[in-house]
């Protein structure tokens, strides 16, 4: 998460590719570092326009999208980089309607409310009080993004050490610890960026378009309805927010068996309310949280709606 926001000139994607190209209809897009500057150009074969990219969102492993400014207005490039393609394609989840001219083909204007959400989820400290100050943002998700401002915490601890001697064991705790949230609140806390249930419903996202709203999908699981107070079914129960995402399915088997009985014939109980799986005890998520291909993302993502998946069954909302 530390690399989810970069200044465009620091993008390893742009620096490692001499020039990225993408053709859509009559429009040819080129993107790369030119003269030391990250540049996007679009041509219709007759005319060409360019823009200097300012911000890169995403690490590039899945994808990376780009913003620039003109006359104080933010614009998002109509094309983004996708790791699986190692090239550009249409920026995802945006209607790629017929384009009117080069300016329209190059980028879409982005309203300030959306811009603030982008920076708040991909960076740290883009807002000071009610003021949006992206030039002061710490790129990527740092400690303060989840734990709040650390300055007061440092001051309190230093004052406590001076007053009480080394250690400061009795200093008041002024740093926020999300790990102490109740289970439902913990999932909503992660959902502030990854998609809470109410936010996803209000946005009208369902089916395939809700797959990347992991908290929403998790809360649609049958087991969630009986486990809103159960710390075993939260985001942080399976994922360490301080470490890299574990991709190996077998890693999560122990997480599943925290809730499911592992012995045939043993009935579910309070400490293990989940039934024994008659199919197997390995790679549980491969069957019960299958990866779903999202064409506009050019990648498959794990569906966090835990369920028994049957062949031919439509994807639940």
Image: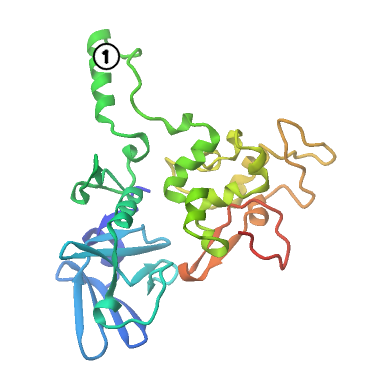
Q: Position of residue 151 (x, y in %)?
A: 24, 29
Observer-nearest residue: 285 or 145?
Answer: 145
Which residue is farthest front? 202
**Residue found at the far bottom of this picture:** 46
- Element marked by disc 1: helix
Quarter of the image for residue 267 reads top right
Q: Is residue 285 left or right of residue 212?
A: right
Residue 116: % across, % down: 30, 52
Number of on-image labels: 1
Residue 44 in view here: yes
Q: Position of residue 294 (x, y in %)?
A: 52, 67
Along the line of sight, the residue nearer the viewer: 250 or 198: 198
Q: Is residue 283 something that shows in the picture?
A: no
* Viewer-nearest residue: 121 or 9: 121
- How far across and how far down the image is residue 203, in percent? 47, 58
Which quadrant of the figure has residue 107?
Answer: bottom left
Task: Check the image and report above or below for 60 versus 149.
Answer: below
Task: Name the residue: 44% across, 33% down.
Answer: 178
Q: Quadrant of the C terminus?
A: bottom right
- Which quarter of the figure has residue 106? bottom left
Residue at image mark 1: 160
- The colour scheme of the drawn protein is rainbow
Horizontal relation, residue 220 to residue 261: left or right: left
Which residue sits at x=20%, y=87%? 47
**Farthest top residue in view:** 164
Residue 205 left/right relative to 283 = left
Residue at (52% x, 42% y) in the render? 235
Q: Residue at x 52, y 49 (%)?
A: 197
Mark 1 burial class by Cα count in 10 Å: few <14, some 14-19, many 20+: some
* Vertical position of residue 10 compared to residue 297: above or below: above
């Amino acid at each position: 998460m530390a690399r989810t926001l970069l200044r465009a000139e620091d993008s390893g994607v742009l620096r490692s590719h001499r020039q990225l190209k993408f053709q859509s209809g009559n429009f040819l897009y080129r993107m790369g570092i030119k003269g030391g500057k990250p540049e996007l150009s679009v041509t219709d074969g007759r005319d060409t326009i360019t823009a200097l990219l300012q911000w890169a969102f995403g690490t590039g492993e899945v994808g990376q999208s780009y913003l620039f400014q003109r006359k104080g207005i933010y614009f998002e490039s109509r094309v983004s980089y996708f790791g699986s393609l190692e090239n550009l394609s249409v920026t995802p989840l945006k209607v790629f309607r017929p384009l009117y001219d080069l300016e329209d083909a190059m980028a879409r204007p982005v309203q300030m409310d959306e811009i603030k959400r982008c920076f708040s989820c991909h960076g740290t400290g883009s807002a000071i009080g009610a003021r949006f100050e992206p030039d002061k943002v710490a790129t990527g998700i740092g400690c303060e993004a989840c734990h709040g401002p650390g300055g007061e915490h440092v001051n309190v601890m230093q004052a406590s050490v001076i007053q009480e001697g080394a250690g400061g064991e009795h200093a008041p705790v002024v740093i926020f610890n999300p790990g102490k949230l109740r289970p439902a609140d913990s999932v909503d806390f992660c959902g502030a960026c990854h998609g809470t249930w109410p936010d996803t419903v209000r946005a009208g996202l369902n089916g395939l378009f809700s797959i990347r709203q992991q908290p929403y999908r998790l809360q649609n699981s049958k087991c969630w309805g009986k486990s809103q107070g159960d710390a075993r079914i939260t985001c942080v129960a399976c994922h360490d927010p301080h470490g890299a995402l574990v991709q190996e399915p077998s890693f999560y088997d122990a997480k599943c068996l925290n809730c499911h009985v592992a012995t045939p014939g043993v009935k579910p109980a309070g400490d293990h309310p989940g039934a024994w799986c008659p199919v197997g005890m390995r790679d549980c998520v491969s069957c019960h949280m299958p990866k779903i291909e999202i064409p506009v993302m050019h990648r498959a993502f794990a569906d966090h709606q835990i369920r028994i998946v049957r062949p031919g069954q439509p994807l639940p909302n």
